[in-house]
Amino acid sequence: MENSSSGNAALIVEDKKYELPILVDREGQCFLDIRQLAKSTEITAYDPGFANTASCASAVSLVNGTEGKLLYRGYPVEVLAENCVFVEVAYLLIHGKLPNAEERQRFSDLLNRHSMIHEDMRAFFHGYPEHSHPMAILSAMVVSLSSFYPEIEEENRSEELDITATRLLSKLRTIAAFSYKKSVGEPIVYPRRDLDYCSNFLNMMFSSPVSDYEVDPVIVAALNKLLILHADHGQNCSTSTVRLVGSSGVNLYASISAGICALWGQLHGGANQEVIEMLEQIQRDGGSVDRVIERAQDKNDPFRLMGFGHRVYKTYDPRARIAKQTCKEVLAHLGVSDPLLDLALVLEEKALAHPFFQERKLFPNIDFYTGITYRAMGIPKDMYTVLFAIGRLPGWIAQWLELQQDPEKKIGRPGQMYTGEQGRPFVPVSDRP
Ligand code: ACO
């Protein structure tokens, strides 16, 4: 990955001076190159949460947290969300270019062709208890795909990779809808060849033997937009997990399955479900947002304002702006008046006006408004993070593929600062107190 150099920084350790090169990326961001640090100084860096560390060079997406800018392969997310369908953006992220009409058609056909899952995998769904979280099922099913579909062969690698990536994109959506059907005790609905990616998902979720699902183009467009907003986001927790697991040499399915688990956490993709639970709690407590704003500031209270704050964005998250607008449009189209939206708007306004949030540059993130939109679409809470996973999948795949081709690829292996005991005398079990 090409970077330019901008001189050196000096590090002085016990009167000895070391030169550390400074690299500059395409966005003008400077990086201290510490690749030779341990070798030359025998000192390593301590950086919990990797807040000061770039783990790789990547050309997939750019997140500029100061300007609130997000690019996928060079295109602003706003432009893609306005003009593309999700499948096109998936193609862009994975192949590095927007598809022409013929490529788009071929990709859609391929997605349709691979949308079924092996019939034997259906039996897995029956093994889960009622009300299993669909993220648990999703992760397990994705790693199981590696047992049902052939390993990538060394010869024909790029063609095999293409098929594996397409298969995964298509099947994740089917697995997600099947896990929903399992959770509500309804029979599984198979994908249909005549429906596009998002319509197919909605049909598999909402049609049943006793009621057809009528595809609503406004809802389909909104779902496309929301999935696009989630499609990639630099080296976030789940993407870093996909890369870390992939760096060991394991297959794509296993790496993505690990990414799904990382996404599930409430500080990451799980926040979209938590936001709705927080708003419901506010509603139950009488509808005042002041109490949660107070709690969020209390250092003795683990509570955080869900859907607020971001490691990178120190200004309004550009995805949250589009998600908020989409939310209003979907609710207006459906004629839904959701008191949770009213609460969210008041909460945002009060938090943004509060010095605690201003000083820490805490703004709504992507998760703040998406849940209210999904709720209006009739999607249950525990499926919100699953939708995030469907959206993020092209990014995970693109990043995994980029890692495989990276000449600087190494197994991920952070160090540690040891704080444990040393040289403890061994005591036989009979003498232990
Ligand atoms: N509510 C209250 N205070 C917050 C919040 C919040 N949501 N987020 C950050 N802060 C405060 C912290 O208490 C800390 O204050 P301090 O400096 O007085 O100690 C300061 O802001 C910095 O917070 P960190 O935890 O150091 O920030 P970090 O970058 O590690 O965390 C994170 C980012 C995890 C997103 C955090 O903002 C958070 O927990 N938000 C709520 C969960 C959430 O919405 N997650 C989704 C993120 S977007 C995504 O993953 C798709």
Image (cartoon, rainbow, N blue to C red):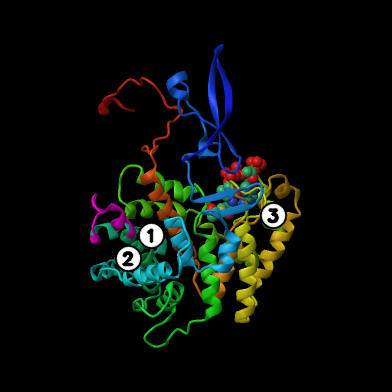
Mark 1 = which residue? 136
**2 or 3: tag closer to the N-terminus:** 2
Mark whose residue sits in front, 1 or 2:
1
Judging by the rendered image, the residue that carries numbered circle 2 is: 128
Foreground pick, 258 / 79: 79
Residue at 56 percent across and 78 percent down: it is: 218
Residue 153 lies in the magenta stretch? yes
Q: Which residue is found at the position 59% from the left and 67% from the top? A: 82
Q: What residue appears at the point 51 percent right and 36 percent down from the top-left corner?
A: 48
Q: Is residue 143 visible?
A: yes
**Mark 1: few/some/many CA within 10 Å (<14, 14-19, 20+):** some
Which disc is residue 293 wearing?
Answer: 3
> Helix, strand, or loop for circle 2?
loop
Residue 302 visible in image: no
Give the x, y percent position of residue 338.
Answer: 63, 74
Find the magenta span and give its range. Answer: 148-162
| Of the image marks 1 and 2, the number of the one nearer the N terminus | 2
User: Do the residues bearing badges 1 and 2 touch, measured as CB atoms within 8 Å?
Assistant: yes
Q: Amino acid at mark 2?
A: Tyr
Disc 3 packing (10 Å; few <14; some 14–19; many ≥20): some
Q: Position of residue 40 (x, y in %)?
A: 45, 19
Amino acid at the residue labelled 1: Ala
Which of disc 1 and disc 3 is earlier in sequence? 1
Determine whether 201 is above or below 72 in the image. below
